Image (cartoon, rainbow, N blue to C red):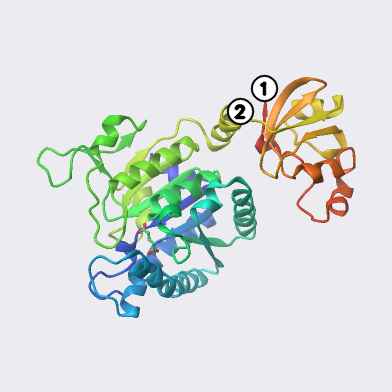
């Protein structure tokens, strides 16, 4: 179990406000932050991609703005976030720089991960940052998100990011070391080291939110678990009270693992095959069919005809004559797909006016039926 994190190729680490911001002074706990950055740097040295999801903007900003302690109104939270996010991003950037790692601030709203076109754009940007070795530091764009379209907690945001980026492990660092069968201070409460499926019994174990500064409790962590596991990503809840929290997980410190059945790619393909309705058709030639059978991406040269009116990111049926044999998420809209159909890959950028690669349907977005 402990090697699961060490072996991960892509890790999302979510850090709760209570760990980063001293509740009494409202200031950043910099030595803890830099110990986590050391752990992240070590994961990167092992070859893993690392994405951070950091809370703390509101907790940091409220004090600077001179707002009182206690519960804040939504607008006050949003105003606090606007102030605190500057300091938060700067703290991460500075700490990562000491390990020669470039930080990238990414502020997202719910729709960026829910709406398919925005999702594809966010995914492409994050992938580019990871390819370049940077560490994205993600938070919700609290200042513009209104209550109806807010995540409100970074546990679920972290899980969405993990599933969007096909991460293999999501680490939720918070002020609790894992899941208990009942509230941890209750007599007879048992620690649960491993959860193989999120059943109603597991959900019933999640008590009330415990933290004073963050907004997540065990309930949002279980919700996050559902998202991560269905995206083929394992999740671990661990305490971030001590320095070097990731090293501690790897050396067998107590924590709760939630285990995904499928891996990210399998989960993604199941989702494409099972839940999405095709809104267009790509009719291809025998050569393209043979390439797809071998696990390749669909290139425009093998496409004979484009039917339907779809957007980038929509689901399309891939057909030989009248028979659908594959299904996938298309990387270009119908108009561009028509322009590039039958053409060589090298001509694509010129034909559609943007260089977004020549795959019409990428093999990771494609399922053979
Ligand atoms: N986005 C909020 C912040 O940065 C935190 C949300 C949460 O506590 O999960 O302050």
Q: Which of marks 1 and 2 is nearer the N terminus?
A: 2
Location of mark 2 (residue): 273
Tell me where residue 64 appears, x and y as whole percent.
34, 79
In what element is the residue under mark 2? Answer: helix
Quarter placement of the C terminus: top right
Q: Which residue is drawn at 89% across and 37% down?
A: 342
The image quarter in which residue 135 lies:
bottom right
Question: Is disc 1 surrounded by few (<14), some (14 to 19) or many (20+) residues within 10 Å?
Answer: few
Placement of 140 over or under 116, stated as above or below: below
Give 281 or 99, whichever is nearer the viewer: 281
**Residue 251 is at least partly visible in this image:** no
Instruction: Respond yes or no on whether mark 1 lies under 8 Å from ligand 1.
Output: no
Outermost residue on the top side: it is: 323
Please tell me how crowded label 2 is: few (under 14), some (14-19), or many (20+) other residues with Cα within 10 Å: many
> Residue 349: percent from the left, percent from the top?
84, 53
Looking at the rendered structure, the secondary structure element under dot 1 is loop
Q: In this view, does 129 lie to the left or right of 316?
A: left
Q: Find the distance from the CA under tag 1 to the CA under tag 2.
A: 8 Å
**Does residue 166 show up?**
yes
Can you identify the residue that label 1 sits on?
369
Tell me residue 249's x, y (percent): 35, 49
Give the residue drawn at x 27%, y 56%: 175
Q: Is mark 2 within 8 Å of ligand 1?
A: no
Ligand 1, what quadrant?
bottom left
Callout 1 touching callout 2 (CB < 8 Å): yes
Quick one: 12 or 146, which is closer to the camera? 146
Task: Say which residue appears at 56% left-offset and 32% top-offset.
Answer: 271
Mark linked to residue 9: none
User: Where residue 345 sits: x, y (%)?
Assistant: 86, 45
């Amino acid at each position: 179990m402990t090697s699961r994190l060490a072996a991960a190729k892509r890790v999302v680490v979510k850090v709760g406000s209570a760990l980063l911001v001293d509740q009494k002074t409202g200031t950043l706990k910099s030595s803890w932050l830099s110990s986590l950055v050391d752990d992240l740097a070590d994961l990167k040295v092992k070859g893993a991609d690392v994405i951070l999801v950091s809370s703390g903007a509101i907790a940091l900003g409220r004090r600077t703005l001179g707002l009182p302690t206690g519960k804040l109104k939504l607008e006050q939270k949003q105003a606090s976030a606007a102030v605190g996010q500057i300091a938060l991003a700067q703290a991460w950037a500075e700490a990562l720089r000491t390990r020669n790692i470039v930080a990238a601030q990414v502020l997202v709203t719910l729709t960026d991960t829910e709406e398919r076109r925005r999702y594809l754009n966010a995914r492409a940007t994050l992938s580019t940052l990871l390819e370049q070795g940077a560490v994205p530091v993600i938070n919700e764009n609290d200042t513009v998100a209104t209550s109806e379209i807010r995540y409100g907690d970074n546990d679920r945001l972290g899980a969405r990011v993990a599933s969007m980026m096909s991460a293999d492990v999501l680490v939720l660092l918070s002020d609790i070391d894992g899941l208990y069968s009942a509230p941890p201070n209750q007599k007879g409460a048992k620690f649960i080291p491993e959860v193989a499926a999120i059943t109603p019994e597991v959900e019933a174990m999640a008590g009330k939110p415990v933290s004073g500064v963050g907004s997540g409790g065990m309930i949002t962590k279980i919700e996050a678990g559902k998202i991560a596991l269905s995206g083929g990503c394992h999740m671990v809840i661990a305490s971030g009270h001590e320095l070097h929290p990731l090293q501690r997980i790897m050396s067998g410190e107590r924590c709760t693992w939630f285990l995904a059945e499928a891996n990210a790619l399998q989960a993604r393909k199941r989702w494409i095959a099972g839940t999405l309705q095709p809104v267009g058709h790509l009719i291809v030639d025998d050569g393209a069919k043979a390439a797809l059978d071998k696990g390749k991406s669909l290139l425009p040269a093998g496409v004979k005809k484009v039917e339907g009116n779809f957007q980038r990111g929509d689901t399309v049926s891939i057909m030989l004559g009248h028979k659908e044999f594959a299904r996938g998420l298309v990387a270009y809209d119908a108009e561009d797909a028509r322009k590039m159909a039958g053409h060589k890959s090298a001509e694509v950028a010129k034909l559609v006016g943007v260089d977004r690669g020549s795959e019409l349907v990428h093999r990771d977005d494609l399922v053979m039926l």
